[in-house]
Image (cartoon, rainbow, N blue to C red):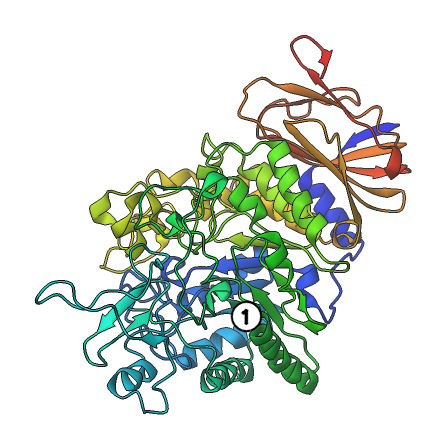
Amino acid sequence: MVLQLLSISAFLLLLASQGLEAKVTSDWWKEEIIYQVYPRSFRDSDGDGVGDIQGIIEKLDYISGLGARAVWLSPVYPSPMADFGYDISNHTDIDPVFGSLADFDQLVREIHKRGMYLVMDFVPNHTSDRHPWFEASRRDPADPYGDFYVWTDCRPQTKAGEAPGGVNNWLSCFGGSAWQFDPIRGQCYQHQFCAQQPDLNFRHAGVREAMRSVVRFWLERGVDGFRVDAVKHLFEDPMLRDEPVAAGPEKLTDDPADHNYLRHDFTTDYNETYDVMAEWRLVLDEVAGATGRRRLLVAEAYSDLPALMRYYSWRGKALADFPFNFGLLTASGTERGGGGGGGSGRFCNAACLRTAAQRFLNAAPEGAWPNWVLGNHDNSRLSTRFPPEGRFVRALNTLLLTLPGTPTCYYGDELGMSDLQLLPEQMVDPLGRRFPEQSRDPARGPMLWSEGPQAGFTDGPSPPWLPVESGFGAKCVARQLRMPNSTLAAFQAVAELRRQREFLDGELRFLMETEAELLAYWRGLGDSGYIVAMYISANTEPLVLDLSASGCRSLSLVADFRAANRNDFSVSGVAMQPGDAIIAKAADCKPDQLELRVFQRSRREEL
C-alpha cells in the first residue's frame, strides 16, 4: 500500500485539469451547498447599519467562491420588525430597509447569471398585527378576512378594570400566554410567537388560497425554492384543550411561563399540516412543469423523527424535498427560538454525532434525500457550541460537507464566527428580552469581511444593528483569504472535493463504530472512495490513527486539517489532536472489510 500526500491546492488543480464539475440535474439541490444569509447581518451597502439586498449582490462572488451555489435568504418582506422580519405586513413586497422589488429582481438575475439558486423564507403560520388582513379581521368578524385568524372568546375579567384573560394554558414560543386580548374585536387571538404575530387560521379556505398566491408571486419572479418557516405550528386543537405539563425526560424547566414547560400535543404537528404542504408542492410542481425547472421545498420543523419524516410524503402525496434535519445541531446545543427544539447542553463527541446522523438516516423513508444542518439564526454558533471556540470548526464543517445529502451552512460558520457576548440591555431579540439566556442575538452578529472599522460590514456613519464580534481581525474574510491553512480555506477545499461522485452518489459506511472520540466513515463507489476521519472529543490527549489495516492498496491524503504534525505521516501512524480532521482518497478497497485502528500516542496502546 502506498500513502501519498497531496497539498490541497495540488488536489484542486488535479480536479480542474480533469474537468470534473458537477453536472446539472433536475433536482439541483442534490449537488449544491445551501448558504444561509441573514440579510440584516450580511453586508450593509447604504450605511444605515442594517444589511440589505445590494450588500448581498456585492458579495455573491464570495458565496460562489465558497463552493456554495444556493443562497437561502431569511425574510426581507415589509415588517414592523417586532421579530426582525418574521412578523410580515405584506407578503409580496420588500421592506425598504432591505431595498425594493427592483433590487430583489436584480438579485435574482445576478444569482442566475452565476449559475446559482435563490431560496426564500416563506412564513405562513402568522402575519404581523399590522397586516391589512389582521386589521380587517379585528374590525369586523363579518369581513371576508374576519376568520383569517384564530379568534375566540377570552376568559372573563377576574378583577375590576382588568382586561379579559387568556383562553387555556397554551404558551407562546417566546414565553407567556399564547393568547392576546384585542379590545377592538373584544376577543382573544392566538399567537404562537410574539403578540404582534397573530396566527393565521389554516382551516379557512381563503387563508390557504392567499398563501398559495404568495408562493406563485415569488415563483413568477424567479425564486428557485422555499424554506417553510415554523410549519409544525400551522394547526391547533379546534377544541382548545389544555396541554399537559412536561414530565420526566421531557421536563426542561420549572418556569410555567417558559414554552418548554408544556408538552405541545395540541398546538403542533397536526396531520392537516401535511395536507397544506401537499398543496404547496402542487403549486411548485405546476410551475416546474411550465418552466422545465424543478423548485425546492424545505420544511422547517423541530419535530420528533416520526413527525419529521412525514414531511417527505403523506398518504401517497409528495411533500417537501426534505425537512431540515436538526439532529446534529440539537445534539450539540439548545435550540433557542424555533419552538420545540432542545439539546443536551453537553459536549457532543464523535459518538454523539455518529448517533445523531444514524438516527436520521435510519428513520428516513426509502429513497428520501438526506440533509444536514449545524447552525442557523436560532441557535448558538457552531464555534461556541464546541468549546474551546474555534478548535472543532474545520472538522465539523468537514462532517457537514462530506455526509450524503444536502448541507446547509449558516453565514460566518465557514470563518469560525462565535457568539456575541452581549449584556441584557444590548439585546433586541424579543425572546432574549424576556429570557436573556435564550436570546438569539448572539448568533446574528455582523459578518466579518475585513480588518477595517466594523469589520467591513458597513462603511457608513451608523453603527451596526448588533455589535461586531470582538477580536474579529483574525477571523475576517480578508485575513483568512491570505492564509492557506485557514478555516475558510479548509471549507473551500472540502466544498470542492464534495463535487466528486463518491461524495455526491457514493455509499456511507461508518467505521470504528465503538470508538467514542474518533468519527470515521467511508464514502465511495465500488472499490474506490474516501476515508474521512475526525477527532471530536473534550479530552486533550492526542491519538494516533492507524490506516495500515484498512485493506486498501493505495491511499492519498488529500485534505489535512491538523493543528500540528503537518507533513508527519506514516501508514501506521497519523497523529491527531482534538479538532483535527483528514480525508484520504482510497483505491482498490473492500468497503465491507475496511478496518482502522486508534492508539494512544503516549503509550502506543490500542484502544
Identified by mark 1, the residue type is: Thr
Is residue 134 placed above or below 372 in the rendered structure?
A: below
Is residue 185 placed above or below 196 in the rendered structure?
A: below
The quadrant of the rendering that contains the N terminus is: top right
Q: Residue at x 62, y 75 (%)?
A: 278
User: Judging from the image, what secondary structure is the residue with disc 1 in?
Assistant: helix
Residue 110 horizontal/vertical position (percent): 53, 73
- Horizontal relation, residue 103 to residue 540: left or right: left
Residue 293 horizontal/vertical position (percent): 68, 78
| Label 1, residues with CA under 10 Å away: few <14, some 14-19, many ≥20 | some
Quickly name the residue at label 1. 273
The quadrant of the rendering that contains the C terminus is: top right
Q: Residue at x 67, y 51 (%)?
A: 496
In this rendering, does residue 479 appear at all? no
In the picture as drawn, the residue positioned furthest to the left comes out as 160
In this rendering, does residue 356 appear at all? yes
Residue 234 horizontal/vertical position (percent): 47, 69
- Residue 173 is drawn in which quadrant? bottom left
Residue 5 horizontal/vertical position (percent): 75, 32
- Residue 356 is drawn in which quadrant? top right
Q: Nearer the viewer, residue 217 or 298?
A: 298
- Horizontal relation, residue 305 to residue 477: left or right: right
